[in-house]
């Protein structure tokens, strides 16, 4: 995998990996083509809510960066929230 694609996936992961508002991801203008490639390859998905895009890594995205997908247990959800709030 190209380093630029891996860097973009790690940006999404570091921002919380699941249900992350686009405004909370430290995008760079030159990453837009890479984002489109990640979307087309199925590494990243997004949903729009109230006019804002929320991004999340897919199982393929987690696999591409060598990290296990987040669990949906209450402890994992709380951990993700703390990571987003406190960095």
Image (tube, rainbow, N blue to C red):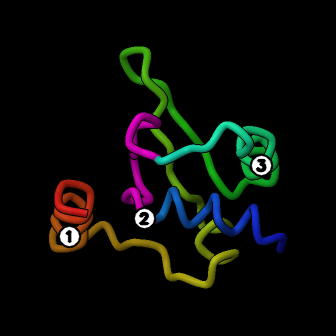
Mark found first going from the N terminus, 2 or 1: 2
In this rendered view, identify the residue nearer to me: 6 or 74. Answer: 6
Q: Which residue is mark 3?
A: 34
Labelled pair 2, 1 in contact (Cβ < 8 Å): no
The residues colored magenta run 14-25
Taking the image as shown, residue 22 lies to the left or right of residue 57, namely left
In this rendered view, identify the residue nearer to me: 7 or 73. Answer: 7
Number of other residues with Cα within 10 Å of mark 2, as a class: few under 14, some 14 to 19, many 20 or more: some
* Relative to 38, residue 69 above or below: below
Q: Which residue is mark 2?
A: 14
Taking the image as shown, residue 6 lies to the left or right of residue 78, namely right
* Relative to 74, residue 23 above or below: above
Q: Is disc 2 placed on a helix, strand or loop?
A: helix
Mark found first going from the N terminus, 2 or 3: 2
Q: Which residue is mark 1?
A: 79
In percent of width and height, residue 65 lies at 63, 77
* Relative to 46, residue 68 above or below: below
> Does 66 appear in magenta?
no
């Amino acid at each position: 995998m190209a380093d630029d694609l891996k860097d973009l996936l790690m940006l999404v992961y570091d921002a919380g990996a699941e249900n992350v508002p686009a405004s909370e991801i430290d995008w760079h203008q030159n990453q837009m083509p890479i984002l489109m490639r990640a979307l087309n390859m199925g590494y990243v998905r997004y949903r729009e809510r109230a006019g804002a895009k929320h991004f999340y890594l897919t199982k393929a995205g987690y696999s591409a960066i060598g990290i296990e997908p987040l669990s949906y247990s209450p402890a994992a959800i709380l951990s993700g929230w703390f990571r987003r709030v406190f960095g």
